[in-house]
Amino acid sequence: MMTKIPLAWLQLKREKTRLAVALAGIAFADILMFMQLGFRDSLYFSNVRFHTSLQADIVLINNQSNALLSMKTFSQRRLYKALDLQAVQSVHPIYLDYTAWKNPFTGRSRNLLVIGVNPAVNVLDLPGVNENLDKLKLPDVVLYDRSSRQEYGPIASEFDQGKTVAAEVNNRRMKVGGLFTLGASFGADGNLITSDLNFLRMFPLHKQGLIDIGLIRLKPGADATTVTQNLKNYLPRDIKVLTKQEFINYERYYWESSTAIGFIFTLGTIMGFIVGTVIVYQILYTEVADHLAEYATLKAIGYTQNYLLIVILQEALILAILGYIPGFAITMFLYDRARDATLLPVLMSVGRAIMVLILTFIMCFISGTIAMRKLRSADPADIF
């Protein structure tokens, strides 16, 4: 017994060129949505990797700080005052600043983020940090982020070959004592970690006793939310007290709502959806218009209007599935190229793949619904 081929598929494959154009249009719309969502999510993820790596339960920042790239300092006495609470186990200050790194091979300068920490305690859960903390106790030694952009020079490869690597950082010669992995972000193309003492030597204008981030570790069993609220009531109002997750969300919200970047990527996704809808509508409308006499004949021999409407929706469903497959495949290739070019975490996720698939279905369904209006003009009387 032969399998019946749906009328919708027979209609679509009859004009192979038109079908190819439709699939190319849907694939293009999917690629556009995938790329915009991919860059948007990589923006959010890359800018909170530092926050995620913090080994702390509660974070203190200046109340006027908006994001990592514009942190305001505050007195470390505020941080140590948190030790008055019994639930607090330890506190750890972090210094942050952006400065120029002079490429030791080309002499060109480029800004990067410098992170100053106390080398006695590891507060950053990043590959390469813990095993190199002792090296930071030496004067003028830094750890270099091996995921920094190549414009800073082949620092990681030179160091891996056992060569001595040094460079000017804020007009001070610093030696690379080890490598770690954090990754570039939209706020910083490269990163350094050094000790708090080396940081103050590197930034002589940075007043001692003023810190950028305060980390608080709680005793086992202490509830971070409760202690956070207690600290808000205890510390002066010039300090913002956040749980670690709130600190991550705080940074993400800044990039999502306070900058144009998040809006642009979202707008690009919407534009891709609109473009795909228009393309599919044009294809389905032309398909119905070219076969209007055939549809009228089907009505004349007893097929209902609803049956013909279902055929159009089936065509839209087939186009959505067949157009999504090449769009997904090409996107994976483009993600790989974009990741190599930008060093940003442009990765495919299951959630995004499902989201774009659903958007593709909706896009084609809307187009099919609009194209149905032409089908209503298929009058059996017109063929006699």
Image (cartoon, rainbow, N blue to C red):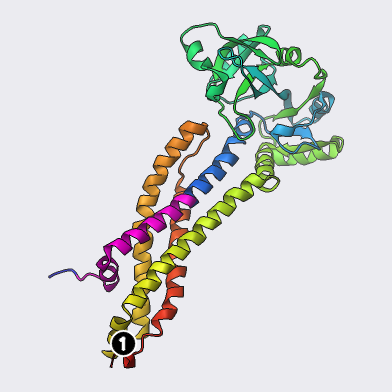
Q: In this rendering, would 34 be left or right of 101? A: left
Residue 295, percent across and down?
Answer: 31, 82
- Point 72% across, 29% down: residue: 216
Residue 178 picture quarter: top right
**Residue 129 visible in the displayed image:** no
- Point 42% across, 68% down: residue: 282
Mostly what secondary structure, the magenta segment?
helix
Q: In this rendering, would 355 be left or right of 333? A: right
The answer to if 7 sits in the magenta stretch is: yes
Query: Can you say which quadrant of the picture contains the N terminus?
Result: bottom left
Nearest the viewer among 262 and 231 is 262
Residue type pointed to by label 1: Lys
Which residue ends up furthest to the right in the rendered image? 236
**Helix, strand or loop status at disc 1:** helix
**Residue 32 visible in the displayed image:** yes
Q: Which residue is mark 1?
A: 299
The answer to if 255 sits in the magenta stretch is: no
Residue 118, percent across and down?
Answer: 70, 17
- Point 67% across, 39% down: residue: 251
Q: Which residues are magenta?
A: 4-32
